Every structure is written in structure tokens, then in C-alpha cells.
Amino acid sequence: MPACGRSAAKPMNPEIRVLDDGKELAREAADLFVWLGEQALREGRAFRVTLSGGSTPRVLHAALAGPPFANRLEWSRLEFYFGDERCVPPDHPESNYGMANETLFRPLKIAEKQIFRMGGETPDHDQAARQYEEMVRARVCPAGSPWPVFDLILLGLGEDAHTASLFPGTAALDESRRLVVANTAPQGIKNRITLTAPAINHARTIVFLVSGAGKAKAVAGVLHDRSVDSRRAPAKLIRPVAGRIIWFLDRAAASALPVSQQDLTYDEE
Ligand code: 6PG
């Protein structure tokens, strides 16, 4: 069982794991991914995981697609969803689906029917968001509940403390009813589709993977600086309702945190 493999009896504060470098971060995160997957499959249910975009997940995907992790899971019983997508076709170099397909789905021979991608190519972005929401409601929300319970949601963090495509000062931050909305990014591909914070917060386990000194200020703003609010640091909106949240940081990304806050697991008082 990975070091942070305890199951949460009640909502817990963020668990912070500081690793030496990106490689160790990927290995630890892959170990937790597979451990959670083994648990779900042992309980006889599909393992529903939501992938994040950008570049950081590439190291995790490479770890999962190789030994020892590739052989530890019955990959055909997993379902892959997305936390956000750029509004581009799936074969576009900026597509989050395209990156996952290249680094994870193809190497692990994941079947099309296991992959639930957002319609980045749909011209009407709000329609694409609503279509994804409808699918998530049907497949991931427990009977009678308006909120999806993903087994694992993987997230990254931008230097502006955005996560998924929840960017500072944007309308998506105020969404309290919808699961998926269209939103805009201040740089790069402007139009996005994203899970909302409440949709993310109902997951069993939420994992942030953050590496590099460029993210240190954003990490400290989210995890330590109470003067920074969630409109400026949207990742602060990510607080599991009943699940666990674990931050995997490399030393560079953790470098602006007080030493006392590094590599500790916080139990709720
Ligand atoms: C996206 C992601 C986004 C990402 C952060 C960090 O679509 O870009 O979902 O939230 O996780 O921007 O990106 P890097 O890993 O590339 O630094």
C-alpha cells in the first residue's frame, strides 16, 4: 500500500507529499493510482479516473504505461474521463485527449469504449459542455445524486494557480449547479471546456501533481497564504466534500512552503 494509501473515514485536510524530483513524483503518484485502481476493481466496480492536461501528466502516464505499474492493473476495467479540454480537434497538438492518447491510451491498448473525451471540436462550446455533463450524469452520478463520484481526479496547477480550466476571475469559478461548463483561458488556446469545482469536489480521491520552481509561488498561495482568495487562486476551490486530497510536489514546487508544511499528512483536528 503506498505511503498515502490510507482510506479516508472523513474529509481530511490536504495531504502534502514532497518528492525529490519529477521521476519520484511520477512513481509515487503511479503507485497510488494503481493501489486505488486495485481497490476499486476488488470491490467489483469500474475504476473511473479523470485525467488532466498540460505537460506534467506525461511523466505519470509514462510510469503507468511501463513496468511495474502496467502489469498491476486490469486496464480493460478502467474508464477514462477528462477534467478539461481545449476547444480543438482531438488530433490537434494542444488537445488533452491527444496527449493522453499518445502517452497512455495507445501504450496500454485502452479501447475506445473506455475513453470518454470532451468534444473539443464541437463549434458550440456550451453545447459540448452540456453534452459532456449529460454523459457524466448518466455514467458517474450515483442514483438520485446530482454530483458525480469519480474514483480519482488528477489535476495540475498553473503558475496563476488555475486548475483544470478554472482560471482566475472567470465565470466558471462561481458555478454551483452545473458539472461541466465552457470557459476561457487568458493565454494559449482561449476556449476551454472544464469540470466545475463542485463536480471535482465530490470525487473519492483528488490528486494534484505539481513540479518545477515556476509553480512554487502558486503552490504557496493555495496551500499556505490565507490572504489569497479563490478568485485569484482557483485551485483553492478544490476541497473534497468527503474524499481525500493529496498534493504530490517535487522539491522545487514545494520550495516556497514553510518547512513545517512539507511532507506531512494533516489529520483534521
Ligand atoms: C490544461 C490543464 C491545466 C494544467 C495546468 C498545468 O488543460 O492545461 O488541465 O489545468 O494542469 O495548466 O499545466 P502543466 O502541467 O503543463 O504545467
Image (cartoon, rainbow, N blue to C red):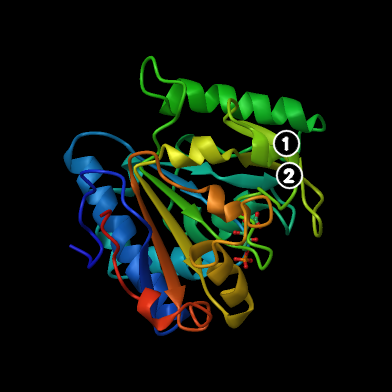
**Extreme residue toward the top, this view:** 144
Q: SS of the residue at dot 2? A: strand
Label 1 CB-ligand 1 distance < 8 A: no
How far across and how far down the image is residue 78, in percent?
Answer: 36, 42
Q: Quadrant of the N terminus?
A: bottom left
Q: Quadrant of residue 24?
A: bottom left
Q: Which mark is residue 133?
A: none
Q: Going 63% across and 61% down the picture, which residue do you hit? A: 161
Mark-to-mark CA distance, 1 and 2: 6 Å
Q: Is residue 268 visible?
A: yes
What crowding class fits label 2: few (fewer than 14 Cα within 10 Å), some (14-19), or many (20 or more)? many
Q: Is residue 125 above or below residue 226?
A: above
59 left or right of 53 in image = left
Taking depth in this image into account, of 69 and 86 the one nearest to the observer is 86
Tag 1: amino acid: Ala
What residue did someone put label 2 on?
A: 192
Label 2 CB-ligand 1 distance < 8 A: yes
Q: Going 24% across and 48% down the picture, which residue do you hit? A: 8
Taking depth in this image into account, of 205 and 112 the one nearest to the observer is 205
Q: SS of the residue at dot 1? A: strand
Determine contact: label 1, label 2, CB under 8 Å: yes
Taking depth in this image into account, of 137 and 74 the one nearest to the observer is 137
How far across and how far down the image is residue 222, in percent?
Answer: 54, 62
Q: Going 32% across and 40% down the picture, which residue do you hit? A: 77
